[in-house]
Amino acid sequence: MRFALSFAVLVLGTPLFAADKDFFFHKNDRIVFLGDSITEQYQYSTDIELYLTTRFPDWNLTFLNAGIGGDTANGGAGRFQAHVLDEKPTAMTINFGMNDGGYQKFEPARQKTYVEKTATMLEMARKADVRVALLSPNAVDRRRSPAFSDFKVYLETQKEFYAPLKGLAEKHGVSFVDQYAITRAALEKMEADKADKVVPFGDGFHTASPGGLFMAHAILTGLGAPAKVSNVKVIVRGNGPIAEPVRCKVENLQKTDSGISFDRTDEAIPIPVQKDWVFLLPYVNDLKDLNDYGLTIMGLQPGTYTISIDEKEVAKATADELAKGINLGNVTTGPIWEQGQKAFDAINAKNRIVHGRFRSVVMFQPPDWLADVANERKALELGKRMTQVNERQAEIYKIVQPKTRKWTVKTE
């Protein structure tokens, strides 16, 4: 199959916007991402947000980010009330540990503080009835050690340093994703493949754009995110084609002299794969477990077929490939990709407001002599900026609403 790096009878699929019951995130969640500079980069958190918004366009979610560069679990515990609980979240992720280990050989005293302060945060979240996903940090890339650390050494420190997290999560009854183990295995595969062009972390630990996806994929799959966007299976028969849709609706299915055509209304749209993610795809399972947007057509005459959506070519595939089923979730052009990209751009714009609200207002500490006036003004400004965030979020949900699109599959 060849993608043009672009991208459908009345038959109903499964219930609208259904999620697997054991998925960590829920409808109407108010979500806080807590962590250090890797969280404040708004890379992995934005990609998680993109997945949740495009996959569940009726979920009415709110996303806040409380990442601070250079922070540790000790700092997180100290600001947990003001930066997390005061925001009234229903769900959150905790992603500390990169700075806690000190970028050096393992030190038990550092680990003791890390475990104790992480436990403090988990207990505070439990008392406030906040659902928690505890994350070990991403593994450092030993191919790209910075001047201040030997990442060949620190990679092994990380393994020992984060070892207590799983037991800590079990003790406190929270979800846990061993992001370190997942990303280390993938990074070692990149080394073995000599995949020098695949660089998730530009400096070896902070995320570039591909690194955001790298982390988001590990976190979402670890939390039970549903893989399937939707799927259409068409069987071409002598007495007319029939469709078997999953999480979508198919209408006006017709066999033509050169192939088939139909109208497809999906319950959700796929994540818009970024062009700088493409090199990374083999190391995130080609997103088969996160962005499965399927098309299967059985009974076509042998040949190569062009797949078009709203008259725009998105891929080419042989009759044999179509009979086995193809995943169109990873195309990087076409009207569905453009719809998702518009949402991604809007999410990034909204998150500039979220970040400004956090840095300029949530974190603002007035001098004692101004506290009475400042606290009143601070509450008003927080509300004002939250209204702006909510308005932007409402616009994003309008963008991701499914549309009926014309699909054609024609032989060349």
Image (cartoon, rainbow, N blue to C red):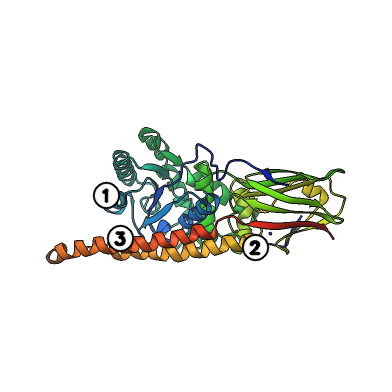
- Check disc 2 and report its element: helix, strand or loop: helix
Q: Residues within 10 Å of mark 1 (few under 14, many from 20)?
A: some
> How many numbered discs, if any?
3
Is residue 76 at least partly visible in the picture?
yes
Q: Which residue is mark 3?
A: 383
Q: CA distance from mark 1 to mark 3?
A: 18 Å
Q: Which residue is mark 2?
A: 335
Q: Residues within 10 Å of mark 2 (few under 14, many from 20)?
A: some
Give the foreground label among 1 and 3: 3
The residue depicted at 79 percent of the width and 51 percent of the height is: 254
> Quadrant of the rendered structure where residue 124 is?
top left
Query: Looking at this view, is 180 or 366 the one in front?
Result: 366
Does label 2 or label 3 sit earlier along the sequence? 2
The disc placed on residue 81 is 1
Relative to residue 226, is residue 66 depicted above or below?
Answer: below
Q: CA distance from mark 2 to mark 3?
A: 36 Å
Q: Residues within 10 Å of mark 3 (few under 14, many from 20)?
A: few
In the rendered image, residue 7, in percent from the top left (x then y), is placed at: 68, 59
Give the foreground label among 2 and 1: 2
Q: Amino acid at mark 2?
A: Pro
Marks 3 and 2: in contact by CB < 8 Å?
no
